[in-house]
Amino acid sequence: MKITSRRCRTAALVLVALIAGNAWARDDEYQRLLDRFNQVATDPALASHAPTAMDRARIALASLKEARRADREHWVYVTERRIDAARASAEAEVMEAKQSQLQRENDRLQLALARRDAELARAELERQRLQAQIRAEEAENARRDAEAARSEGAQAVEAARAETQQAKKMAAAQARAAALAKKEAELEASLAGKTPPTKDKGKGKPAAGGKKP
C-alpha cells in the first residue's frame, strides 16, 4: 500500500510538472508573439498605420492565449502570420506616405521651377520688347535725321540756285542800267549840240607834196 501510494504521488507530481511545463511553454510562446506585436504597436512610425491588420493580430493573440492545447499550434501559426502582415502593411503605408510626401515635394519643386522659368521668360520678353522699342526709336530718329539732312541739302541747293538766279538778274539789271545811262548821256549830248566826235579812218590831213584840189 505504501508503495502504491508513493507511486500515485509520483505520478501526480509528474502530471503537475507536465501541466506546469506545458503552461509555461504556452505562456512563453504567447509572450514571444506578444513582444513581436508590441514592437509594431509601439513603434512611433508604424503604430498609427494598418489599423485593420493590427486588430486582426490582436484577435489572433487573444485566441492564442485562450486556445486549447490541440489548437495552440494552429493559433501560433495564425498569430505569427497576422503579426507579420500587420508589420508589412504598416511599413507599406509608411513607405507610401513617404512616397506621397516626396511626390508632393517634387510637385512643389516643379511648380516653383515652372514659376521661375515663367518669370524669366516674362523678363526676357520684356527685355526684348524694350530693345525692340529702343531700336524702333533709333530707326525713327535716324529716319528723321536723314529727312532733315535731305531737306537741308535741298534747301541749300535751292538757296544756291536762287542766289545764282538773283546774281544773274542783278548783272542783267546792271548791264541794262549802264546801257540806259549811256543812251541817256548820248541823248543829252545831242540835245546840247555837242555830238561826240567820231573817228573816221578814211579822213585825215593831206600828205606833204600832194596836189591841192
Image (cartoon, rainbow, N blue to C red):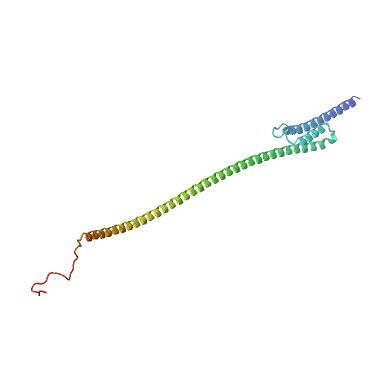
Q: Quadrant of the rendered structure where residue 20 is?
A: top right
* 176 left or right of 26 in image: left
Report which quarter residue 201 is drawn in.
bottom left
Toward the viewer: 197 or 136? 197
Position in image of residue 23 (x %, y %):
81, 30
- Image height of 104 relative to 197, above or below: above
Residue 32: x and y, percent? 75, 33
User: Which quadrant of the figure has residue 72?
Assistant: top right
Q: Residue furthest left?
A: 209
**Quadrant (top left/top right/bottom left/bottom right) for the N terminus:** top right
Q: Residue furthest top?
A: 2
Outermost residue on the right side: it is 1
In this rendering, would 2 be left or right of 86? right
Q: Position of residue 131 (x, y in %)?
A: 50, 47
Name the side, left or right, on which 212 lies relative to 105. left
Left or right: residue 11 compared with residue 195: right
Return the residue nearer the eye: 151 or 159.
159
Task: Please name whichever residue, 71 or 165, is drawn nearer the observer in this view of the structure.
Answer: 165
Which residue is located at x 56 percent, y 44 percent? 122
Report the front residue among 53 and 140.
140
Residue at the image position 55 percent from the left and 46 percent from the top: 125
Quarter of the image with the C terminus is bottom left
Q: How many marks?
A: 0
Image position of 140 with respect to 56: above or below: below
Judge whether 183 appears above or below 94 on screen: below
User: Could you tell me residue 175's position as x and y percent?
Assistant: 29, 59
